[in-house]
Image (cartoon, rainbow, N blue to C red):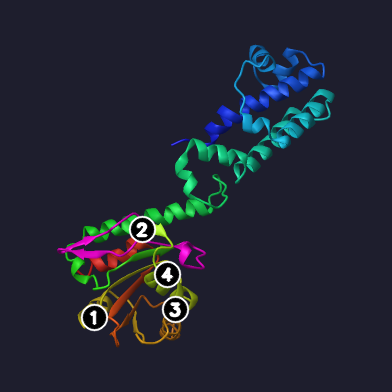
Amino acid sequence: MRFIEEVVVDEFLPTFRSLLAEALRERGLTQSEVADLLGISQSAVSKYVHGEVDRNATLLDDERLHELVEDLADGLASGDMTPVQALVEVEVFVRRLERGDVLASLHEAAFPPLAEYEDDFDIHDPESHLRQSERVRSSLRRGLRVLENTSGFAGLIPAVGSNLVECLPDAEGIDDVAAVPGRILDLKGRAHVPGEPEFGVSEHVAGMLLAAREAGSDARAALDVSYTPETIEQLEAQGLTTVEFDAEADPDAAVADALAGGSDVDVLFQTGGFGVEPIVYVFGPDAPTVAGVIRDLL
């Protein structure tokens, strides 16, 4: 694990400081004056000015960095800019380079697991897509552990398999819903989870969750299990609201009709149809909560 701050310290700072030290010396400042402005030792200034530090080639090729250095050097040398203002300008510049820019690319090269995220992101943004995605995956893993450790869960898995899904807060489509790739299957009486949670790998259960949200539900997770009348009775005994829908109707329309009487429905179920296996869908705020509902059935 490598933090972007390490990239800033190891790659950006030596490059930036050496360029700025050179620019200030070119404007007639002594090594002592440069050291005071930059808050470093005179020996460090000497190393910067004489090229005795490693500089990042990618950053050296970035014209924006050179423009910033020239502006700062002019301002600091003339007294028109205070060191505090210079610091603020550099901090703003660094934050910009961290958001899908050159520092983000250097961070990705230093920490390859970041490469799987195709969208630009701000590593420091608490509401970033990256952070939200990882929180959803983590929640889903916890829910899956509950199911794997629930004795008897395999007996509730439908013939088509189960899936536990959880979506991002602002989910709009299948790609915003994380799920088990393939399905959770009954393998000799044990629930088998074939892989790590991924986004965009579930159409059916994810589609049901999205349809419920479109109809007004605030649920962010869902799980499908086999239908029996006893299962519905047990869920209702937990205080959950259950509603039946038409298995042979268009799923979006069927879910919308089922939720028309109120969006606080916890369970949707259908009792089967021509070529359609009867299924129960349990909804909740997150994957562990939904998994806990099933655990409490057994």
How far across and how far down the image is residue 14, in percent? 62, 24
How far across and how far down the image is residue 146, in percent? 26, 59
Image quarter of the N terminus: top left
Residue occupying image coordinates x 29% and y 88%: 274
Within the image, what quadrant is residue 231 found in? bottom left
**Lower sequence index among marks 2 and 3:** 2
Task: Please report the bounds of the magenta region as a residue range.
Answer: 168-197
The type of residue carrying mark 2 is: Leu
Spatial separation of the CA atoms under disc 4 and disc 1: 21 Å
Q: Is residue 23 left or right of residue 219?
A: right
Q: Which residue is mark 2?
A: 140
Spatial separation of the CA atoms under disc 4 and disc 2: 14 Å
Within the image, what quadrant is residue 190 found in? bottom left
**Lower sequence index among marks 1 and 2:** 2
Spatial separation of the CA atoms under disc 2 and disc 3: 23 Å
In terms of secondary structure, where does tag 1 sit? helix
Residue occupying image coordinates x 23% and y 60%: 192
Within the image, what quadrant is residue 239 found in? bottom left
In the picture, the disc for residue 233 is: 1
**Lower sequence index among marks 4 and 2:** 2
Q: Which residue is mark 3?
A: 263
In terms of secondary structure, where does tag 2 sit? helix
